[in-house]
Image: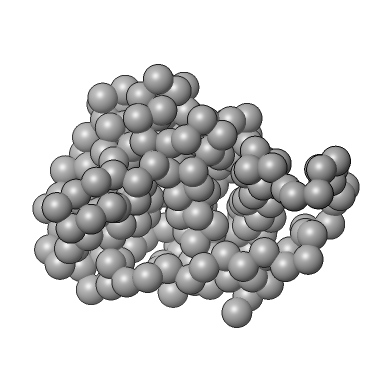
Amino acid sequence: PVLLSYIGPEPAQPRTGGAHPNYVMANERMNLMNMAKLSIKGLIESALNLGRTLDSDYAPLQQFFVVMEHCLKHGLKAKKTFLGQNKSFWGPLELVEKFVPEAGEITASVKDLPGLKTPVGRGRAWLRLALMQKKLSEYMKALINRREILSEFYEANALMMEEEGAIIAGLLVGLNVIDANFCMKGEDLDSQVPDLVFTHKWGVTI
């Protein structure tokens, strides 16, 4: 596993014996935001040093997508389907084209991609196409500004509903200096993404 660690101020401890759910969610948001900051900064620096177009095999890029996926999954409401309960970040991403018409192009491309069997796979493909388009920050900002729509998909204290989500969306604009090219027809985007395992107070393992 790859360890991403953040050194920063220690979060305030709850006064009561057990951790309140709101405290737990706030702590998770802070950790995810710090991991996103670290991942974005590392990706930009390493890509500029590399000086070439990035592809799906580039490790810092893989790490970035894992962190982004966990940010988008944080506080997702479970949707009931005929197969049971399902949590997918494809739902909110699919709506971006309603606010930014340009996003319709990648949404259509995702739906046309052969081999994608799950909403998670479609969400991952969407993120990759948005990065290639250099519009990921713009799309995320547009989504975060529609809290009333996001509330259909996320709990009130989810990362996408709170300040941390807006901060991450702003940081994503730095990725516009990166050139990336993905050939997704041969990629398995439906398989399970690695978990983020929080270590001690500041670290996270991918």
The residue lying toward the viewer, choosing from 193 and 47, is 193
Residue drawn 55% across the image and 39% down it = 159
Residue drawn 53% across the image and 72% down it = 59
How many numbered discs? Answer: 0
186 horizontally vs 124: left or right: left
- For the C terminus, which image quadrant? bottom right
Rendered location of residue 36, percent (x, y): 62, 51
The quadrant where residue 181 appears? bottom left
Rendered image coloring scheme: one colour
Q: Is residue 138 above or below residue 131?
A: above
Rendered location of residue 63, percent (x, y): 54, 65
Rendered location of residue 80, percent (x, y): 24, 46
Q: Is residue 187 above or below residue 10?
A: below
The residue lying toward the viewer, choosing from 31 and 128, is 31
Residue drawn 51% across the image and 30% down it = 156
Rendered location of residue 55, percent (x, y): 41, 67
Query: Is any part of residue 50 visible from this angle?
Result: no
- For the N terminus, which image quadrant? bottom right
The residue lying toward the viewer, choosing from 50 and 100, is 100
Query: Is any part of residue 157 visible from this angle?
Result: yes
The quadrant where residue 184 appears? bottom left
For the view shown, which residue lies furthest in the bottom direction? Answer: 1
53 horizontally vs 12: left or right: left
181 horizontally vs 95: left or right: right
Q: Is residue 196 above or below residue 159?
A: below
Q: Is residue 149 above or below residue 67?
A: above
